[in-house]
Amino acid sequence: MTTPTFVEMTAEADGTLQVRLTHGPSGSVLSTDAPRDNGGTGASFSPTDLVASGLLSCMLTTMALVAAREGIAWGPSRGRVEKHMNASPRRIGRLEVELWLPPGLTHEQRARMQHVAESCPVHRSLHPEVQISVQYH
């Protein structure tokens, strides 16, 4: 049985709608702001933007990890995600992901990477009511 792992992150709110987040292990800092349509300035990622970005990043990272582990040649890849919010209750309703995989993968390797992307930890962590569509290029 493995020991559960954890990562501590901290947040500081300055009395506005902006929050400063610090990643415990690295000390990296990023800020969030509420979106304009919800009273913020839109000056940075919103918390729901981070969820959408986390999905995209997790998919790309997990594919690269599995490719390295399985000896699959992995070159440059990229993606984009479009977040659609539901009004009531206000939450993420749909995430539309596009992924550009490296050229030169066999049919079997592409199928494997698609399965890996759609099985990444963030994808598996999202509520089943969040519709996720993925298009591969």
Image: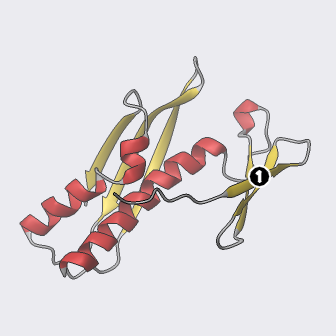
Q: Position of residue 116 (x, y in %)?
A: 25, 58
Q: Position of residue 4 (x, y in %)?
A: 46, 56
- The kind of residue tagged 1 is Ala
Q: Secondary structure at mark 1?
A: strand
Question: Is residue 40 placed above or below 107 in the rendered structure?
Answer: above
The residue drawn where x is 58% and y is 50% is 50
The answer, for residue 103, to whether it is visible in the render is no
- Residue 80, quarter of the rendered image: bottom left
Instruction: Tell me if 40 is positioned left or right of 2 in this view.
Output: right
Instruction: Tell me if 2 is positioned left or right of 54 in this view.
Output: left
Residue furthest right in the image:
15
Instruction: Tell me if 21 is positioned left or right of 90 in this view.
Output: right
Question: Is residue 17 placed above or below 113 in the rendered structure?
Answer: above
- Count of numbered badges drawn on the protein: 1
The residue singled out by tag 1 in the image is 11
Residue furthest front in the image:
1
Q: Position of residue 17 (x, y in %)?
A: 82, 41
